[in-house]
Amino acid sequence: MPKQTSSFITNYKPTDFIDAELVEKASLWILRIIMKTHGYREFMDEKGSFDYNSKEICYFLGLEKYTLMDEDQYTRSEVLDILSKKLQSLEKRKKFNSLTVLSRNIKRIANLAGLNSAEERVLEFSVLIKRYEILEKGVRLLGNELNSLQTKRILSTILDIEKDEIDAMFASTSKFSKSSLLLLDKRNNYSLDIKLDLLSDEFCENLLSLDEDVENLIQDVVKPCQKSDLDIQNYHHIKFDLDLMLSHLEHALQTKQKGVNILLYGLPGTGKTELAKVVAQKLQAKIYEVSYTDNEQEPIDGKQRLKAYKSAQTLLSNENTLLMYDEAEDIFENSGGFFFAPPQRQKDKAWINRILESNTIPTIWITNNVESVD
């Protein structure tokens, strides 16, 4: 994702690094990193010298003069004392500005996903550290090998949110986890900006640039389907099954029944995708497709597509909506059968089963090879 950067200039201003509305909020976050999470150890060494990344943080925080001085002209404690006073001043503030478009979009998402104010703040932070290089440099002071426990403790400190609340946000039953809007990578140790896993880079960019409905914010991973040129009469040869399908889906839409899934399978070109669209048109429902290629027509892997599917289940559930998941074999691949599968395969199967049992939007799954489905 592109980030705002600054060229090498003198007499830096904070707005050379970040939008004016965010200067004080970003300063608070970076100062908390330095002063409250031991980030000062990476910010400057014991002699008081700065590396390139730390110098940019100095420029942002108004400490440019120290980067031009010899190390014997100042002490480490002198610099940290200045930063401590800056932090104390900012801590007294009750409210900080945000980007207008981002705030509106987060509020739209919060209303649909049921996010609380603390979750909104974590979502905002996660977006901004991926957007602005100065914030990325700030969180990199924390190191590149954070585990999940360290990540949650650091988030609590930077955003002044109780640790118990942070723990709850990333529990397996949390709103973040169920929607896949923001996940915590629990399998790998990374820097904070990478540990916080947003739905997609495009989703992050859309939150910052599009002041539109939520369906447009996730359009790179879940797209509305084009209307089909066919109609029900083109499928008279499967009338019995089709009548059952229509009745089942109509009831599900009317009653908001959970766990409704239809599997269509057959050879390529037999009209499965068009049938899904025709069914939606007959039921006067919107139908969205979970994308299997990105904007560059590169394939999207099954894990990323499932994240998109879960987000759609959360963000589009208030509408009269169906979902279509074409090429479903990318997540249902049997790989030799469940009983002979490795432990991770069994874990994945249980996870997929839970999704199928609890989805709020009826979904039509499509595959060319039913033998690939367990």
Image: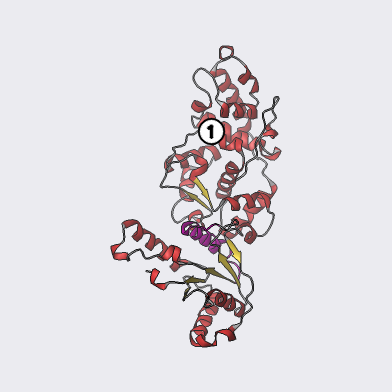
Residue nearest the observer in this picture, 112 or 184: 184
Residue at image x 31%, y 58%?
342
Residue 235 highlighted magenta (yes or no)? no
Which x, y percent locates residue 98? 66, 43
Residue at image x 38%, y 63%?
349
Residue at image x 67%, y 52%?
104
Secondary structure under the numbered disc 1 in the rendered image: helix
Q: Is residue 267 visible?
A: yes
- 364 with respect to 100 (left or right): left
Q: Is residue 354 visible?
A: no
Residue 136 higher or lower than 229, as above or below: above
What is the magenta range?
298-320
Which x, y percent locates residue 70? 59, 14
Q: Amino acid at mark 1?
A: Ile
Q: Main secondary structure of the magenta part?
A: helix
Label 1 packing within 10 angstroms: few (<14), some (14-19), many (20+): many
Which x, y percent locates residue 351? 40, 61
Residue 103 higher or lower than 310, as above or below: above
Residue under numbered circle 1 = 33
